[in-house]
Amino acid sequence: MKNISLNIDKVAGFVSKETIAAYEPQVKACMETLENGTGKGNDFLGWLHLPSSITAEHLADLKATAQVLRDNCEVVVVAGIGGSYLGARAVIEALSNSFQWLKAKQDGPVIVFAGHNIGEDYLFELTEYLKDKKFGVINISKSGTTTETALAFRLLKKQCEDQLGKEMAKKVIVAVTDAKKGAARVTADKEGYQTFIIPDNVGGRFSVLTPVGLLPIAVAGFDIEKLVEGARTMETICGPTTPFAENPAAVYAATRNELYKDGKKIEILVNFNPKLHYMNEWWKQLYGESEGKDGKGIYPSAVDFSTDLHSMGQWIQEGERTIFETVISIENPEHTLQVPSDSENLDGLNFLAGKRVDEVNKMAELGTQLAHVDGGVPNMRLIVPELNEYYLGEIIYFFEKACGISGYLLEVNPFNQPGVEAYKKNMFALLNKPGYEEESKAIQARL
Ligand SMILES: O=P(O)(O)OC[C@H]1O[C@H](O)[C@H](O)[C@@H](O)[C@@H]1O
């Protein structure tokens, strides 16, 4: 069976292969630090051997709960933000039919997301939509206290109980949270909800292979066994015994750090398949929160091509030369669609007649790569045989492992995110949250 692979040939004109290869001892040291748990943030390494430690019983439990939601709900709202949201959405959107929600007949509950914004209109419209629906909720929060998620859940819990009654609501509300702490745990225990635990040593952005991601993905009808199997394969391939040049996580971490040193401060994750949009978003959190600290870190940005070639393409081709690209390239689409011939050829597209749409897409991809490299943008490609559960599992673990190595190469703690608290503190002070009296006074004085 093929695996995902990393091609760095189009980086060679910017940093030499020898320079990358010279990272081997440093990368090896970082990998040992991860394995031995001796580096910064070492209480958050639960993701490192997570795929190989997931049991068949655990997956069966998740699938059983997912089935209850599938049997009883027309809609399931997944409430969460950041790491408690993006992984599930990334996988579900990558695997779903692009027009699923427009289909009259659904083969499982429609999955919608909440708790990742405080838009009043968004929440109003969601509650309106749910008014005549049998809906369930998966409330996901590691801390159990995140305001955005807690606020959405308060609305959803009330609506669910009002519409279904307390007893039925209990059956279709599931909490994924800490084993002991946090308001989500208190509520779940008091109300008697089914719960799944987020292990203490797995940080939010590394948690997609815990119930945080696995439960919603199973509810959406996708194969979580295959997802975990793919991740397991990458756990081996990216493991400490694989030689540097054959370890894609090691090579990716080394290459991006060398490019960064060379003044390439921004990495753009690129796809040529709109289903990967939320994979971009998941990746942005993974790398942004892990590396952006101590005044350092590559800025993770992302684009969907061709869409953004017609908006950001100009900047990428000719703007400030501080960027490099990592392209996720899907080798084989799931479906076949040929360009039809047209006797009048008014649009002049008969030169494409009989070709698959993917052939056109692949030439757009190749043409873009060559143009961007010519324009001074180093380019890596992550080649993915197909877009399915197995390869998404590989992609997830590959990026996680590379992120751990990369963060240590950069000499930051890749597993904390202290900077995220600054806005929360101000928001609580502005809202006069109990316990923030001093901060409230201080912030009012600044306005
Ligand atoms: O799962 P939660 O505790 O609700 O946290 C959700 C998210 O919000 C936080 O502020 C962090 O920046 C993220 O790393 C985290 O994934």
Image: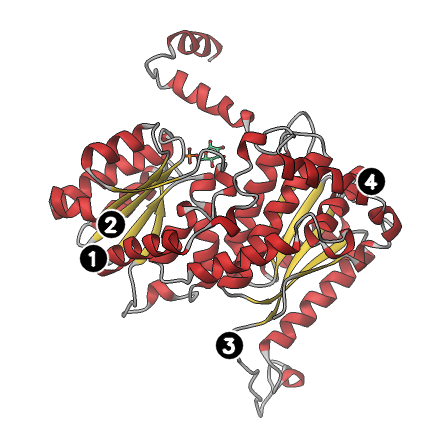
Residue under circle 3? Answer: 335
Q: Name above or below for residue 180 compared with residue 369.
A: above
| Residue beneath disc 1 | 72
Q: Residues within 10 Å of mark 2 (few under 14, many from 20)?
A: many
For marks 1 and 3, give the CA distance: 31 Å
Question: Label 1 amino acid?
Answer: Asn
Q: Secondary structure at mark 3?
A: loop
**Disc 3 from disc 2: Cα separation:** 32 Å
Identity, as a three-letter code, of the amino acid under mark 3: His
Q: Give the CA separation, mark 4 to mark 1.
A: 55 Å
Q: Position of residue 94 (x, y in %)?
A: 48, 60
Pointer 3 or 2: first along the chain: 2
Label 3 with label 2: CB-CB less than 8 Å:
no
Q: Residue at 25% x, 36% y: name it.
A: 188
Residue at image point 49% right, 34% down: 201
Q: Quadrant of residue 177?
A: top left
Question: With respect to residue 250, does 10 lie above or below?
Answer: below
Image-based side of 169 in relation to 21, left or right: left
Q: Amino acid at mark 2?
A: Gly
- Give the residue at x 23% y 34%: 189
Amino acid under disc 4: Asp
Q: Secondary structure at mark 2?
A: strand
Disc 2 target residue: 136
In the image: residue 155, left or right of residue 354: left
Is the C-beta separation of discs 1 and 2 under 8 Å? Answer: yes
